Amino acid sequence: MNLLNFFLTYTIKLPENKFTPYGYDKRKNSYYLKDWYLTPSYFDGAWHLYSNKNLEDLFTGVTETTVNFVYPKNLNLATNFTVLGNSSISNGQMAQLTADQQKNCEILLSPEKRFMTHVTPQITVITDIEAFKYADVFKGLSINRVTEFIENNLGKYPHRQLLVSQLDYEKNPLYGINQLPSFIRPYEEQFQFEMKFLKTALINILEETLFLDPRKEQWLSDAIANYLMIEYVEEFYPDQKLLGKLSKIWGVRSFNLAKMNFNEQYTFLYMLTARTNLDQPLSTSNDSLIKFNQKIGNKYKAGLGLAYLASYIGKDKVDKSIKTFYKHYKLSQVKSLDFESILKNLRVQISTGFLKTL
């Protein structure tokens, strides 16, 4: 096989972040970069080329990447790549960023130093997830608990550090919590922070390590992430109510909504589309889903599917299947059929078409 070197010179024009979170924030003098440089498309005998539809589903191959990044002196850098070095130069700062078998370099630049580094026994975490009246020392304890849970129930994260940003959370928030005014806080700060961090961390971990077709098989990542979120609440907050402290208020506590447990929201929100005949199969391509299903309905449906499977064939079998799948297929191109084959190899008696009918 002949190796070819291509040297490309091009200019990137960053838009203002008026319509998407990406680009330049004029008000805060900050930048958010993702999918910002030329990247080889995935090829498996045929090229997989998808138009950009603001779905964040760039389909790339497994690459080894080094970025020499020059930026102004008055800005602070946070990234999901490993920073090998950072030095001052005549016109600013230069950082060398590197990654092996990661998808894309995500960069956040801001005047203030928002991001904190937490070194846990499992992984180094860089985060600026917001928490109202929750001290940094307690944040550290919560992050330790969440990273330990993820490693025990999914597997070891193979990269040096994990970026968990408030911007990433705002793109995939905890629906319900994010709809309430800031002065209404029905949940304890510890619970709210841990759920925000857990959801964002799981999404980023699966995106960085499972190279599924993000347009056609995103549902599998959603299923694993939401299933683990359900498990986390059942393990650490089994008595948590959907309305939190509001469920104890006179005039509210008599409603059925106030009696619902936190995990019942997955069925409740998914059924909003099912009852109006707007339900779509999990195998539906991302660009063919209605907005509610793309953001909420199908994600919750996928997690509920695994939870139902666990109650039907045994939780231990599904848990083992997830850990086996992640162990053998992380950092490699993978398909949802590989997960189904693991379930079958564990001698789980399910019909071949079960996953297709969810």
Image (cartoon, grey):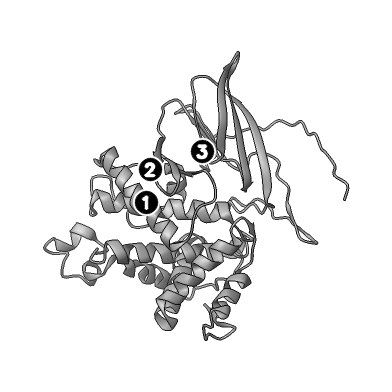
Q: How many marks?
A: 3
Residue at the spot 50% in from the left edge and 52% down from the top edge = 157
Q: Amino acid at mark 1?
A: Lys
Of badges 1 and 3, the one in the foreground is 1
Does dot 1 land on a helix, a strand or a loop? Answer: helix
Residue farthest to the left?
250
Q: Is residue 286 left or right of residue 166?
A: right
Of badges 2 and 3, the one in the foreground is 2
Q: Residues under labels 1 and 3: Cα distance?
A: 24 Å
Q: Is residue 331 left or right of residue 258?
A: right
Residue farthest to the right?
2
Q: Residues within 10 Å of mark 1 (few under 14, many from 20)?
A: many
Q: Is residue 74 visible?
A: yes
Q: Residues within 10 Å of mark 3 (few under 14, many from 20)?
A: few
The answer to which of marks 2 and 3 sits earlier in the sequence is 3
Q: Are marks 2 and 3 in contact (CB under 8 Å)?
A: no
Q: Position of residue 58 (x, y in %)?
A: 64, 51
**Which residue is label 1 attached to?**
196
Q: Residues within 10 Å of mark 2 (few under 14, many from 20)?
A: many
Q: Are marks 1 and 2 in contact (CB under 8 Å)?
A: yes
Does dot 2 land on a helix, a strand or a loop? Answer: loop
Q: Amino acid at mark 2?
A: Ile
**Which residue is label 3 attached to?**
18
Residue at the spot 40% in from the left edge and 47% down from the top edge = 121
Q: Is residue 276 left or right of residue 351?
A: left
Q: Residues under labels 1 and 2: Cα distance?
A: 8 Å
The answer to which of marks 1 and 2 sits earlier in the sequence is 2
Residue at the spot 28% in from the left edge and 61% down from the top edge = 236
Q: Which corner quadrant of the image does residue 34 belong to?
A: top right
Using the image, determine if residue 141 lies above or below residue 346.
above
**Which residue is label 2 attached to?**
129
The answer to which of marks 1 and 3 sits earlier in the sequence is 3
